[in-house]
Image: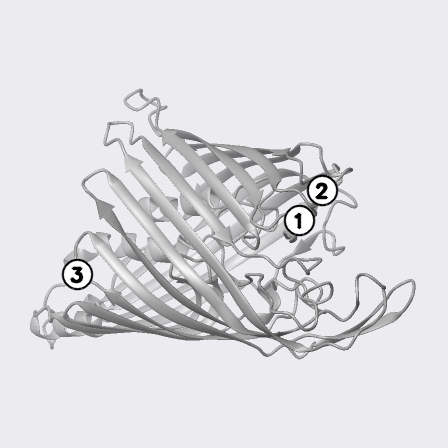
Amino acid sequence: MNYRQRHSPQALLITTVLLCGMTSAFGQQDSDVVRRLERQLREFDSMYRLTIPSDQPIAERLLLDFGGTYRFGFYTIDSPSGSTRILRQSDARLYLRAELDGTHRFFGRLRFLYNDWNAGDDFDGRGDELEDPIAERYWYQFDLRGATLAERGERVPYNVNIKAGKQFVTWGSGLTLSHALYAGLVDVEFASLGLIGLAGLTPSGDTVDFDGSRPGFDSDTDRAFFGGALEYRRSATHRPYVFVLAQRDHNERDFATFTGSLDEFPTRFDYDSTYLGVGSRGTVGPDFRYRVELVHEFGEGLSNSFDPVTGLAVSQTREDIDAWAGYFGLTYLFRDENDTRIDFEVIGATGDDDRLDSADTFGGNRPGTDDNAFNSLGYIHNGLALAPEPSNLLAFSLGLSTAPLWGISDYDKIRVGVTGRVFTKIDKDAPLNVSTTADTFVGGEIDFFLDWRITSDLNANLRYGIFLPGDAMPLGEDDPRHFLYVGLGYAF
């Protein structure tokens, strides 16, 4: 059998991606892990994508690759009240990838994540624990173009690619969906067009819902996604696309009674949304890369269950959703030996000024009004220390990264970067997912990173962010907030 027990470059790639993607104490999943690993292995194994004789034994046609990583991370995170939480995190991952004839692919990964908090520092009250699930990713993929290449040595101008299992799905830029799903993806390519279909369900136990007032929002989430996208693929420099994505609320834990000082508030939960988007990604000349997307969210959701003026319960009504979000990113590549680059990004989304919280049903949209707050299971990196959701936010960022010691032995694999961010509210009277007053300027943030590939198997990483509050931060939550992460990873 043709197999490899160990590939340090590939395993190192996994470690680097995992460490660079850390943005919060909850170990936010990095959306590039599976895709970048798959792409790297495809390039490395391109020699096996030649015509395969029909009588060749399976031992000569099967490629196996397996390995793993171990990462230890140390975090300090400031809460809104100014207290500091301490977390030590051990994260071990084992993966297996198999490929037959360049046509059938399987990927599986186990994750053993243990959180060790200082006494009383955990956010969910569960204390130190081994996180579930252990089976983090597993999917099967069929590639029709690979099959024809293996059988006839011919690269056909069309393709059908099917991928099914527990996988990380990023839809468009990630504004609407960037999450692990039990999903099936079908990509049909013909001539210059690519048509993508999606059907998926959220993994119940490892999905944190955007509605934090719903019972079981962090341990029992059940939302279904159905989508279609059309891409133009003929151009080598631009890839425009349009998409539609429907989200349907299937949560069984859809009722709770909240108790206030004046009344009790029986509350039902139901939020069905659809996202219509248009965007493009590509290059402008040899030095610029861009990505842009505009999304309209519509659908229906249940209104708030109490009147914030009287403090008394009110009947909930089903109201229309009418929200927008947009994203623009531009990268300039210096193309020097230090691989220097500048990244500029803008993220914005509408909010709703009669909400008390940007995403929750309890304290949410007022009965009899449209809901203008943008909510989804999407994710785009928006800083370390504050990390606000896009709803009612207009955020600007400018970053510079480089390898300053390139060419100096033992230190040429060090990469450093700094990013400055500015956060403002689109509607000063509408809420964010963090507490604010009726002011516009939320604050600024400076994030630093350092990555050092010490050896081919050993990687060190540092992340530090400081948020400097603006006029919109309330008293008691207007001190600077810090986020620090130090990690060491080993690939095997």
SS for dot 3: helix
Mark 2 or 3: in front is 2
Sequence-first disc among 2 and 3: 3
SS for dot 1: loop
Q: Which residue is mark 3?
A: 48
Local packing at callout 1 (Cα closer than 10 Å; few below 14, some 14-19, many 20+) is some
Q: Quadrant of the N terminus?
A: bottom left
Q: Is residue 57 visible?
A: no
Sequence-first disc among 1 and 2: 2
Residue that sits furthest to the top in the current view: 408
Quadrant of residue 261 in the image? bottom right
Marks 2/3 in contact by CB < 8 Å: the verdict is no
Sequence-first disc among 1 and 3: 3
Marks 1/2 in contact by CB < 8 Å: the verdict is yes
State how far apart marks 1 and 3 are (Cα).
51 Å
Q: Which residue is mark 2?
A: 80
Q: Amino acid at mark 2?
A: Pro
